[in-house]
Image (spheres, grey):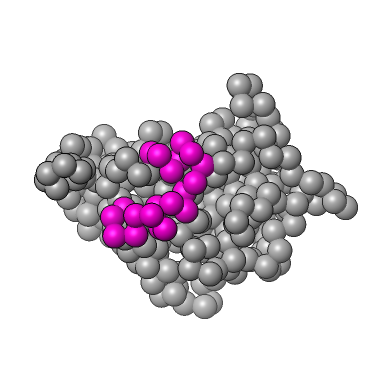
Amino acid sequence: MSRLPSEHPIRPQALSGIKNIIVVGSGKGGVGKSTISTLLAVGLTHQGLRVGLLDADIYGPSIPQMLGVCGAQPVVRADQIIPVDVAGLQVVSIGFLVAPEKAVIWRGPMIHNTIKQFIQQVAWGDLDYLIVDLPPGTGDVPLTLAQTIPMTGAVIVCTPQAVALADALRATRMYRQLNVQILGLIENMSYFIAPDTGREYDLFGKGGAELATTQMQIPFLGSIPINIAIRLSGDRGAPMDIFEKDPQGVGQAVALVIKNLLAQVDSIPPSVL
């Protein structure tokens, strides 16, 4: 990033019709980032908002599986990719273009060009929110997005363990270097409530993420528990079940996170967006 010529900065180009672009990232893999991206997008759609979901995790696209649309084929019309419609949610993923068992072995320039194509050559239409599921880490994709489009902000996902929080700190510093607003941090797999006893277990510790947000001076958006309903909804490709069949359980936790996220977006001065 330090090698970018400061006298000729790359200026992100606004996308017509998209009000807010939120990227969901993490400093490491395995924290449930794609699950959170899917739940945020579906939850916003459940509230009547117009939402798109871009699966930018080039090496491990899992959004098609989570939405139950594996094997879907986007239509190309007048050099524009038409997103796959999933109950009103507009979805684009490299998983639609590559066989599930095929490994994507690409260098940086190919990733850069693919991400730009997914942003600039997709007929997203009018959206209130475009949620972008990033690959883990601090590499090519976040940099390409920061150079290509003006993002509303970034959401960081982590788990309570110290090693995950350390990686979340690295992701926070990356976004600050890229001048991307950090909307907040979500602690995933935060706790487990035994269905038979109702007792809460802190499998990975407790309170670490909220404490870390104070140290990093970023908002804490909330905690999502370990819950079998999340696993089942992802395996079945039916994430709407979280909100329709478990509204008082994990659905309530996700709804609170979404409420806090929308509040953060609303608090951004119009001149910044």
Residue in the picture at 28% in, 55% down: 249
245 part of magenta stretch: yes
- Answer with left or right where residue 229 lies relative to residue 199: right
Foreground of the two, 139 or 41: 41
Image: 100 above or below 204: above
Residue in the picture at 69% in, 39% down: 72
Foreground of the two, 143 or 226: 226
Image: 149 above or below 3: below
Image: 271 above or below 50: below
Foreground of the two, 261 or 148: 261
Residue 243 shows in the view: yes
Question: Could you tell me residue 245's position as x and y percent?
Answer: 38, 54
- Give the magenta part as a residue range: 231-250
Image: 110 above or below 149: above
- Answer with left or right where residue 98 lies relative to residue 48: right
Question: Could you tell me residue 189's position as x and y percent?
Answer: 28, 42
The answer to which image quadrant residue 231 occupies is: top left
The answer to which image quadrant residue 93 occupies is: top right
Image quadrant occupied by the C terminus? bottom right
Residue in the picture at 42% in, 58% down: 244
Residue in the picture at 16% in, 42% down: 196
Foreground of the two, 101 or 134: 101
